[in-house]
């Protein structure tokens, strides 16, 4: 691990340099605003790249998941939604409910501008269930055309309505929090789920001061009058605006999730922020010192732009919640489009939510593990299996008999030796760049090996998801790539070579596993049992519907064995 930590610090230094460059340019990466397109809606929506089982509304733009919760027998998902068009704008809280987190029923928008404190927008926030009282939503209201941000609350109009369809924003105490002295009122948003500790409810609100990212802490005895703690719970220099902070405990043993209010010696805390400047999310594991209301990341957890990510692809503004019905913590994340705004207007829709993931602490204590919720398996239909298939350099073998454009595939690869692994160069700190340098067509020692998703018959188009193993001085470095560069014959798309390093010890077992959820324009992959995950958005022209194929491949010198592969055609979910 020493090696990787060293790599991480190097990354941090490099990124700091980038921050300085960016700050000189004054770039603001917040949603691109196209006023003339915000209310342009299409009569018909293009189905070509729409998803079969990833959440999306029938049309228009979506972004952040908001206020996920389980209450009174139903899961609720709210999300940022433009009811009038397929670019960002006119944002309201759309609302859907579900019994299983897979099939959803759409309701009318729950929260939309209607009060002086949210007249210019109802932005992201969270739900908290107050024991004995019911849910309260905290969200960011936009007060004026200068985008002044305040935190507001809303409560269900009728707690006996099982869907909690209507929400009201009481005039009393609203807004609950405004930016006080020294707080940047135009970068002050996204309240977290509250936790209860030492007689107080506590929340975080994301912000920044110049280039220092900040999570302010507010506390309240009654959920109405809130005061800012003397210190933020945590800040980090050079990271820019912290959007959508999420703060919660994870158990140090086992996979069970914990209620957000749990503290103690048996837990670690997670602080996640969405960094507006990179448009990626980072998290640390650490200790929450309740007596001083401070969070301190572990020394194995890099704080900031070189740190750990839930996902190394299109995945942003995520939010977790505790599901008491199955004692698990579930993570929702928004996956934006990788096509152009013109494409989005033509399609009539933009944005999906990733498959909800159960999340827990890896036994090593240095990172989280994520895995698609088990309910997803209910969509598995026809199954195809392969085992003990040897792949020598240059082999690729088709997995036939499933709907490759809408599939779930789980595969375990093994290899006999690591002796021929390529040497790792310590300057390779950025996984995405390394994948860009060493794609599936650059033959290696151990790897590249993996799967080719959304592939056309003759491989004019394909999105390879693969491992590549390198030898550093005292350990092996494993790279997982999800490379969109050959995903579509169409040019002018964003086709990144997304990648992340995988923290596994290959000295004990020479095996690596991969699961990919393939869904027309989505390839959502989980490497090594959910240690390193990558969601890619891709838009094939040929590998569409029944013209899509799935292959396993090896392009390294060392033969690879597909020990076991199971893949399923996936049924469509009933969504909205
Ligand atoms: C918005 O900011 C401008 C420039 O600082 C100021 O002149 C104007 O009064 C502000 N408007 C509101 C509604 O706060
Ligand atoms: C406050 O936020 C605005 C963006 O909304 C930004 O332009 C400005 O630089 C910030 N000020 C400070 C001191 O961070
Ligand atoms: C990291 O913290 C642990 C205790 O949590 C300590 O034992 C170890 O020495 C620290 N390592 C470094 C490099 O500071
Ligand atoms: C494997 O490498 C060869 C040689 O570079 C290349 O032609 C082929 O496309 C590669 N296979 C894949 C799946 O990238
Ligand atoms: C998703 O879209 C791509 C391509 O336009 C951008 O490069 C990303 O910054 C964007 N991601 C987010 C979180 O907005």
Image (cartoon, helix red, strand yellow):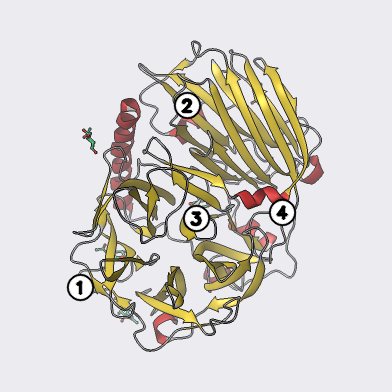
Q: CA distance from mark 3 to mark 1?
A: 40 Å
The quadrant where ligand 4 appears is top right
- Number of residues whose C-alpha sits closer than 10 Å to that of mark 2, classed few (under 14), some (14–19) or many (20 or more): many
In three-dimensional space, the C-alpha distance between marks 4 and 3, rounded to whole angstroms, equals 28 Å
Residue that label 1 marks: 181
**Towards the viewer: 53 or 240:** 53
Which quarter of the image is occupied by the C terminus?
A: bottom right
Q: Quadrant of residue 79?
A: bottom right
Mark 4 vs mark 1, foreground winner is 4
Query: Percent from the top left, x then y, of residue 176?
Result: 33, 79
Q: Secondary structure at mark 2?
A: strand
Instruction: Judge from the rendering whether residue 517 lies leftward or rightward of residue 182; answer left or right.
Output: right
Res 366 → quadrant: top left
| Secondary element at tag 4 | loop
Say which residue appears at 79% left-offset and 32% top-offset: 400
Labels 4 and 1: the sequence-earlier one: 4
**Contact flag, marks 2 and 4 (Cβ < 8 Å):** no
Picture residue at 73% right of the left edge, 63% below the top: 45
- Mark 3 = which residue? 327
């Amino acid at each position: 691990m020493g090696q990787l930590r060293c790599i991480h610090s190097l990354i941090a230094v490099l990124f700091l340099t980038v921050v300085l460059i960016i700050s000189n340019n004054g770039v603001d990466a917040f949603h691109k605003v196209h006023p003339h397109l915000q209310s342009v809606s299409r009569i018909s929506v293009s189905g070509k790249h729409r998803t079969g089982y990833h959440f999306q509304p029938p049309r228009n733009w979506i972004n952040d998941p908001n206020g996920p919760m389980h209450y009174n027998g139903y899961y609720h998902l709210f999300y940022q939604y433009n009811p009038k068009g397929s670019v960002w704008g006119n944002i309201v809280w759309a609302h859907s409910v579900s019994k299983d987190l897979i099939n959803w029923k759409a309701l009318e928008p729950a929260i939309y501008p209607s009060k002086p404190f949210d007249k210019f927008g109802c932005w992201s926030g969270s739900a908290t269930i107050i024991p004995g009282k019911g849910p309260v939503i905290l969200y960011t209201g936009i007060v004026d055309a200068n985008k002044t941000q305040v935190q507001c609350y809303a409560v269900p109009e009728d707690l006996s309505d099982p869907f909690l369809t209507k929400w009201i924003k009481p005039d009393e105490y609203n807004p609950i929090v405004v930016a006080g002295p020294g707080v940047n009122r135009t970068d002050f948003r996204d309240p977290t789920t509250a936790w209860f500790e030492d007689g107080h409810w506590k929340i975080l609100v994301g912000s920044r001061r110049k280039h220092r990212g900040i999570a302010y802490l507010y506390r309240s005895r009654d959920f109405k009058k809130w005061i800012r703690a003397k210190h933020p719970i945590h800040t980090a220099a050079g990271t820019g605006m912290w959007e959508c902070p999420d703060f919660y405990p994870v158990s140090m043993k086992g996979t069970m999730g914990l209620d957000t209010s749990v503290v103690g010696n048996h837990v670690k805390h997670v602080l996640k922020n969405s960094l507006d400047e990179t448009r990626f999310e980072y998290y640390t594991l650490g200790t929450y010192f309740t007596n001083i209301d401070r969070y301190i990341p572990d020394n194995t957890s890099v704080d900031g732009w070189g740190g750990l990510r839930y996902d190394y692809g299109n995945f942003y503004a995520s939010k977790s919640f505790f599901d008491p019905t199955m004692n698990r913590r579930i993570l929702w994340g928004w996956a934006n489009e990788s096509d152009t705004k013109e494409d989005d207007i033509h399609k009539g829709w933009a944005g999906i939510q990733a498959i909800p993931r159960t999340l827990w602490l890896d036994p090593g204590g240095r990172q989280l593990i994520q895995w698609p919720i088990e309910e997803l398996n209910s969509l598995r239909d026809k199954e195809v299996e392969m085992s003990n298939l040897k792949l020598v350099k240059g082999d690729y073998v088709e997995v036939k008999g499933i709907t490759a454009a809408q599939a779930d595939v789980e595969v375990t690869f093994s290899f006999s030796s690591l002796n021929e692994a390529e040497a790792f160069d310590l300057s390779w700190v950025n996984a995405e760049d390394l994948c860009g340098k060493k794609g599936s067509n650059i033959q290696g020692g151990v790897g590249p090996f993996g799967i080719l998703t959304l592939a056309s018959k003759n491989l004019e188009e394909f999105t390879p998801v693969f491992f590549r193993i390198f030898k550093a001085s005292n350990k092996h470095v494993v790279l997982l790539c999800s490379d969109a560069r050959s995903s579509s014959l169409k040019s002018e798309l964003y086709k990144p070579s997304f990648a992340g390093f995988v923290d596994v010890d290959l000295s004990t077992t020479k095996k690596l596993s991969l699961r990919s959820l393939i869904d027309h324009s989505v390839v959502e992959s989980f490497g090594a049992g959910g240690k390193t995950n990558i969601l890619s958005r891709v838009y094939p022209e040929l590998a569409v519907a029944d013209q899509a194929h799935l292959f396993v491949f090896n392009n390294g010198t060392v033969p690879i064995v597909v020990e076991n592969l199971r893949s399923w055609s996936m049924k469509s979910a009933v969504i909205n």
